[in-house]
Each structure stands twice: as C-alpha cells, then as structure tokens.
C-alpha cells in the first residue's frame, strides 16, 4: 500500500500547487500544462471545475499573487488510507485528507475521502467524496438514514458512484486528526461494525 500513500501525498501537494498556480503563473500555456498535470491524477478529470477564468486580467492575477504571498496556508494532511474489496470495482482505496491548513486553525479535520484505484495507467482517483460531518461517516443520524449523505457516510462529488465500499481489507494510519468528528471515525474499529441490514 506504500504506493497509495505516496500517491495521496502527491495529490495533496498537487492540489495545493494548482490553486496557487492560477495566480502565480502568468503564462497561459504554462498554466494549462500545470493544470493537465494535476488532472492526470484523475481517471476522468471532467467536472472538476478547475481552471482560471479566461477573463482574468493581468492586474487581477498580480493582486491575487500578492495576497498569496501573505497567506500562510499549507498543503493538506494525509490521515489514513483504507483498502476495500468492492463487489463491483474490486480493490479500491479511500484516502483521508484535510483541506489546506492554516496555522490559525488549531483543529485538523477530514475534508475528502476520494477513492483511488489501480488502472492500466497507474493509480488514479476514480471518485470524489467529502466527509459527512453530520453522521461522521456512519450513514446514520439520530437513529435514521443520514439526510446529508443519503446514508452513505460520504457525500458524493463526482466520478464513480462507489456506495458501500465493501469489505475492509487493510487500514494504514498516518496521522490522527484533532477535530472530534474526524477523530471519532479515525478511532472507530470498522471490522467490529455490525453488518448493515441492506
Ligand atoms: Zn451523513
């Protein structure tokens, strides 16, 4: 699973850089090449909603670059990776990552739980999911199906509809989040979970 951890770290670095590139790279060709590099981490990059507006003026870009210089944002954190055996997709991985970290924010928390798969072109993100803060990825809220994630535990943002990830095969913990909701998931023993009634 080492290569998946490596991939997840690269994703965090690329994700951080592409946001900055929109302001820092003046040359459109160079920027597009950078964007392509980032998008190559996805099996189907369509629908990512990336790319700077073509109407952005050089003045606006420079002002953005100035703001960035003052920003203390750092790349997101990799918390853990889980491997599953999915009934249809086979071997899949969920990578648990935070958003960009600002030193002012004390808590570190889950933001995304994208699904990664081995393809003929190497590891790729095949589905984008966001941590459900309402049910803490249990799919249950106040004894009922969580309304925010439709009982999935994760909010679908694009790509393959993975649904239930299947049988948990392995967990590789890297760093514990400090936010309570995220930590609850991090410490949960999924293998001891009762089988769902679905
Ligand atoms: Zn939920």
Image (cartoon, grey):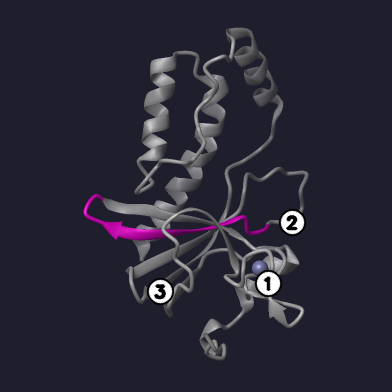
Disc 2 and disc 1 in contact, CB within 8 angstroms: no
Q: Position of residue 155 (x, y in %)?
A: 59, 60
Circle on res. 87:
none
Secondary element under disc 1, as helix, strand or loop, is: loop
Q: Residue furthest left?
A: 120
Q: Residue at x 71, y 80 (%)?
A: 144
Q: Is residue 46 above or below residue 90?
A: above
Toward which corner of the image does residue 196 lie, by quadrant? bottom right
Alpha-carbon neighbours of circle 1 within 10 Å: few (<14), some, or many (≥20)?
Answer: many
Asked if the stretch drawn in magenta spans residue 157, the answer is no
Q: Is mark 1 within 8 Å of ligand 1?
A: yes
Q: Residue at x 72, y 66 (%)?
A: 134
Give the dominant element type of the magenta stretch: helix, strand or loop.
strand
Look at mark 2 in the image and give the residue it sits on. Answer: 107
Alpha-carbon neighbours of circle 2 within 10 Å: few (<14), some, or many (≥20)?
Answer: few
Which quadrant is the N terminus positioned in?
Answer: bottom left
Q: Position of residue 10 (x, y in %)?
A: 43, 46
Toward which corner of the image does residue 57 lie, by quadrant? top right
Distance from disc 2 to disc 1, alpha carbons, whole Å, reads: 24 Å
Look at mark 1 in the image and give the residue it sits on. Answer: 146
How many circles with numbers are drawn on the protein?
A: 3
Specify whether 98 is left or right of 191: right
Q: Earlier in the sequence, mark 2 or mark 1?
A: 2
Specify the segment rendered in magenta: 109-121
Look at mark 3 in the image and give the residue it sits on. Answer: 84
Distance from disc 3 to disc 1, alpha carbons, whole Å, reads: 22 Å
Distance from disc 3 to disc 2, alpha carbons, whole Å, reads: 28 Å
């Amino acid at each position: 699973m080492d290569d998946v951890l490596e991939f997840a770290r690269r994703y965090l670095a690329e994700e951080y850089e592409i946001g900055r590139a929109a302001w820092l790279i003046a040359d459109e060709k160079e920027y597009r090449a950078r964007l392509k590099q980032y998008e190559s981490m996805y099996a189907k990059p369509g629908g990512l909603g990336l790319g700077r507006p073509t109407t952005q003026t050089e003045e606006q870009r420079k002002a953005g670059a100035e703001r960035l210089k003052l920003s203390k944002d750092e790349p997101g954190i990799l918390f853990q990776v889980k491997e599953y055996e999915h009934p249809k997709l086979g071997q899949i991985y969920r990578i648990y990552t935070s958003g960009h970290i600002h030193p002012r924010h004390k808590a570190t928390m889950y933001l995304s739980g994208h699904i990664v798969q081995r393809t003929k072109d190497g590891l790729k993100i095949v589905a984008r999911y966001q941590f459900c803060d309402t049910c803490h990825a249990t799919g249950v809220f106040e004894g009922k199906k969580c309304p925010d994630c439709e009982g999935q535990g994760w909010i679908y943002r694009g790509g393959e509809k993975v649904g239930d990830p299947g049988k948990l095969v392995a967990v590789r913990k890297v760093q514990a989040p400090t936010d309570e909701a995220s930590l609850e998931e991090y410490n949960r023993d999924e293998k001891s979970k009762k089988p769902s009634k679905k």
